[in-house]
Image: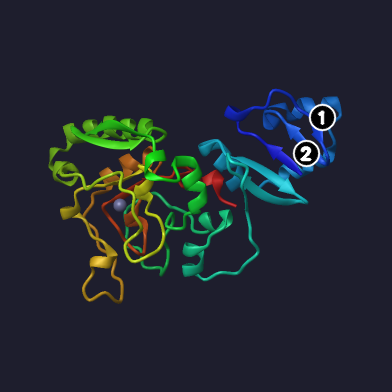
Amino acid sequence: MRVIHPPNQVRPHCSWRRRRVRLCRPLRWLPLGVVLGWSTAALAANEAIPAPLRCLQRYYGLAFELVDGRPFVVLPDGTRLPYDDGRVKSFEERLNAPDVEDMFSIPYRRGPVRPVTTPDEDPGRIRLEPMFAAIYGKTPAEVDLVPVRLVGQLLRVHRKAAPAFRRVDERLKRLLAERPALRPFLTGLGGTFSWRKIAGTGRQSAHSYGVSLDINVRRAHYWRWQRPPKPLRWQNQVPQEIVDVFEAEGFIWGGRWYHYDTMHFEYRPELLDPTCYP
Ligand SMILES: [Zn+2]
């Protein structure tokens, strides 16, 4: 069993404990480990770490661990969540009870805005709730909110996502200077932090963590508002340039979903990094 700690949780020393090898800054020191005679098994095991787990470490500082060759993500309180729970699931089951692998099962694709016509192509709607709760807060009081300005409007967002929101603001200011006609999409911003369940589900909304933003609701389309409700027909007015700005700073857009929610942007840098997929 091997625990790999993120850089901000580096242990003061490396030690053996039972069959467990604790490695400090393992990725950086692996070449040195070879020189010092660390086992090739450890290196091979490192190759067994799936790309998504490396990305959860890179973007969220989460540790990972191999237990008898099976990878897990390790939350700060020590809870282990399996990378692959071994179950074959429908889309609904992946939404309601995902493992880490499920979160990365639908690639998020940037590029020209286009209708999403493949049923259940919803990259980013599958969220491993205990993981996000551990990263951002398990209760409203735990969510560490700070003020940021976006296009002149004061918002409250999670401290961890605030730098990305500020970079979006810089980009939007430059965009609006060139294209003032886009401003109506970015007025009356629909909200960031709101501790709540997703409408019609028992799942916690990404707005609960202060990492999501709804832009002007009056310029948006949402699949639950569609009448008649079925079949789903993707609709959108949000311009490409606005989508590009958010995606450039690690935000996914709900207009890339079959279950479209075109006002919704959400900080999910791991999904915008093509190296993070299995
Ligand atoms: Zn939203």
- Does the residue at mark 2 contact the one at mark 1 (Cβ under 8 Å)? yes
The residue pinned by badge 1 equals 34
Quadrant housing the N terminus: top right
Q: Position of residue 81 (x, y in %)?
A: 61, 52
Is residue 252 visible in this depiction of the protein?
A: no
Question: Height in image: 6 above or below 231?
Answer: above
**Alpha-carbon distance for marks 2 and 1?**
9 Å
Helix, strand, or loop for circle 1? helix
Q: Position of residue 128 (x, y in %)?
A: 50, 54
Question: Height in image: 90 above or below 190?
Answer: below
Q: Which mark, residue 43?
A: 2
Is residue 201 visible in this depiction of the protein?
A: yes
Left or right: 18, with 30 as reference point: right
Left or right: 164, with 28 as reference point: left
Assess disc 2: are there few (<14), some (14-19) or many (≥20) residues with their C-alpha within 10 Å of its C-alpha: some
Closest to the observer: 119 or 125?
Answer: 125
Residue at 31% x, 39% y is 245
Q: Which mark, residue 153?
A: none
Left or right: 105, with 225 as reference point: right
